Image: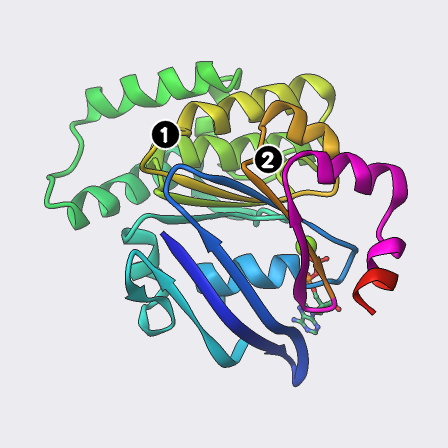
Amino acid sequence: MLVVKDLHVSVEGKEILKGLDLTINKGEVHAIMGPNGAGKSTLSSVIAGKDGYEVTSGTITYEGEDVLEMEVEERARAGMLLGFQYPVEIPGVKNVYLLKAALNAKREAEGLGEIPAPEFMKLIREKLAFMQMDASFLQRAVNEGFSGGEKKRNEILQMLVLEPKLAMLDEIDSGLDIDALKVVAKGVNSLRNEDRAVLMVTHYQRLLEHIVPDQIHVLMDGRIVKSGDKSLALELEAQGYDWLQEETA
Ligand code: ADP
Ligand code: MG
């Protein structure tokens, strides 16, 4: 589904990703861990098409297509979704309108018409209930005044409505209390199937107990320096990253 090869990315003239390789197959969940500033957000942002990153060499292929040739909205229509580490507030735009506009844009790309209003309201109420969110969140401006945990739930709500093929979730667990973590994990797990894939950035083994990944990768100094199964997260929790620094050096 996603193949990243020898990716080099600079931000403001500084090289952040320095030859990163990553392959994700359909049906798989991959977790990326690594120290602060390693380039984890840079990686998911570049794949999703966020502005401000310069790809100096390497390739990203999604379902056989050259991602770097695709506009950000083309990537979204092709089924990619980025759940932000820091979700943006959009004052003046009601949450429900954003969800509806995004869903209709996706449907249009699939050759479907606009979703009838009653059908949309039924869908959205179902997803809200699943995420244990109050209906009042629909009428509020997107993320405006939402607590950290509410913003993260809202990112997952968007994901459940849009049903992306490749969901990239950047620190979706940061700032969540235990109950919210379980709800967010339930949301992600509900989307798992053989046609979809998930790339999650996290610092905590705790999340990976609820969303068990097929592979864990450690991103350090702009590259994936180690990959493994979920036992790697336990090892990192116990030992931190220093031993890997020495190992890779
Ligand atoms: P991570 O998500 O692994 O903590 P990031 O990908 O957010 O790391 O950032 C990697 C490095 O790139 C950091 O040193 C960060 O300061 C730098 N960086 C990211 N965005 C910008 C920017 N817009 N301007 C300058 N430096 C940036
Ligand atoms: Mg980050």
Q: Image check: 145 left or right of 162?
A: right
As helix, strand or loop, the secondary structure at mark 2 comes to helix
Relative to 98, is 122 above or below?
above
> Which quadrant of the figure shows ligand 1?
bottom right
Q: Image check: 12 left or right of 177?
A: left
The residue labelled by disc 1 is 193
* Ligand 2 neighbours mark 2 (CB distance < 8 Å): no
Position of residue 9 measured from the top left corner of the image (x, y, whole percent): 58, 76
Mark 2 or mark 1: which comes first in sequence? Answer: 2
Position of residue 89 measured from the top left corner of the image (x, y, whole percent): 56, 47
Image disc number at residue 18: none
Q: Which of the 4 image quadrants contains residue 107?
A: top left
Whole-angstrom CA distance, mark 2 to mark 1, is 22 Å
Q: Which of the 4 image quadrants contains residue 94?
A: top left
Residue type pointed to by label 2: Lys
Asked if residue 146 is among those painted magenta in the image, a careful observer would answer no
Q: Looking at the image, which is closer to me, 28 or 143?
A: 28
As helix, strand or loop, the secondary structure at mark 1 comes to loop
Asked if residue 235 is among those painted magenta in the image, a careful observer would answer yes
Residue sitting at the far front: 247
At x 11%, y 40%, the residue is: 112
Task: Specify the segment rendered in magenta.
Answer: 221-244
At x 63%, y 38%, the residue is: 229
The C terminus: image quadrant: bottom right
Nearer the observer, disc 2 or disc 1? 1
Q: Looking at the image, which is closer to me, 189 or 48?
A: 189
Relative to 207, is 166 above or below?
below
Residue type pointed to by label 1: Asn
The residue labelled by disc 2 is 152
At x 48%, y 77%, the residue is: 58
Relative to 138, is 226 above or below?
below
Q: Is residue 52 visible?
A: no
